[in-house]
Amino acid sequence: MVGGDATDMRLPSSTWTELDAVDTDLALLPVGSTEQHGPHAPLGTDTLDAEAVADAAAERYDDPVVVAPAVPVAVAEEHRRFTGTLWTSEDTFRTYVRDIVGSLAAHGWDRVVLVNGHGGNIAALREVAGRIVRHDDAYAVPFTWFDEVDTDVAMGHGGPLETALLRHANPETVREDRLDEAAEGGSDRWGDWQGHVNLAFDSHEFTANGVVGDPREGSAELGEELLDTASDALVDLLDAVADRDPHPTAE
């Protein structure tokens, strides 16, 4: 799991005695969502993708990194009209994430990267990370995997990037026989725009089946590239977090 160390550092599959023997203050907390991703991709897409990036980075990192269980329900009310989508309020989400980080910090894992797979979480994660750094005995910083990849293919929703990463890391979850349906019933753009104003608040207002973009463009080969790029960026971030003084003195 961890470069240079054969120990699996994922909390759900470790014993407390194994983790008690590990010397590290670094932890990864994958944060996803349970929300529609069209007719071809599972509701857990964002969680699966966040976990894949977190696991890959932990494997590549030279020192031990604890990987917490993923947060599977988050800020996703914009997909409420599609069956199976779950959501929580931003206040509840922030409190829950903060409590988990506090639990990690209580065991000495007080430098935590929040590995995010859902766009709707971005603002809330930035806010709660700031609250943690200012008021708690921990340092936390958010990392959104798709912000770290450089590709000509648009992100979309249930589109080529998310589908590509699933096809590489969790290929059994993609309904390959529904990709044409997903593309034909989707939208080519997120939102319903008048100038620079998005008139829509919920995704069903502009996409009939929940998809934005053409998932057929998301190959497993692209997914491998995305995972490499995102996990390498996360490794670099771990170095920065490990070296950072979280409470520098103002001059």
Image (spheres, grey):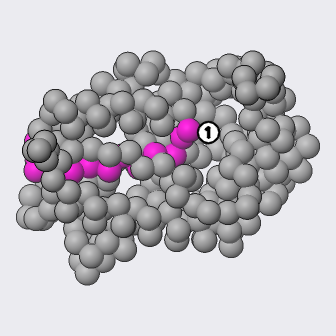
Q: Check disc 1 and report its element: helix, strand or loop.
A: loop
Total labels: the figure holds 1
Q: Give the range drawn in magenta.
A: 103-119
Whether residue 175 can be seen here:
no
Can you say whether 187 is above or below 26 in the image?
A: above
Residue at 37% x, 20% y is: 92
Closer to the camera, 121 or 208?
121
Residue 43 is drawn in which quadrant?
top right
Image coords of residue 136 (percent x, y): 15, 33
- Say if the magenta span includes residue 107: yes
Residue at 68% x, 49% y is: 155
- Say if the magenta span includes residue 25: no
Image coords of residue 93 (percent x, y): 39, 26
Residue 20 is drawn in which quadrant?
bottom left
* Left or right: 94, with 104 as reference point: right
The residue that mark 1 highlights is: 43
* Left or right: 71, with 182 as reference point: left
Residue at 84% x, 37% y is: 187
Closer to the camera, 20 or 58?
58
Crowdedness near tag 1: few (<14), some (14–19) or many (≥20) residues, C-alpha within 10 Å: many
* Left or right: 61, with 179 as reference point: left
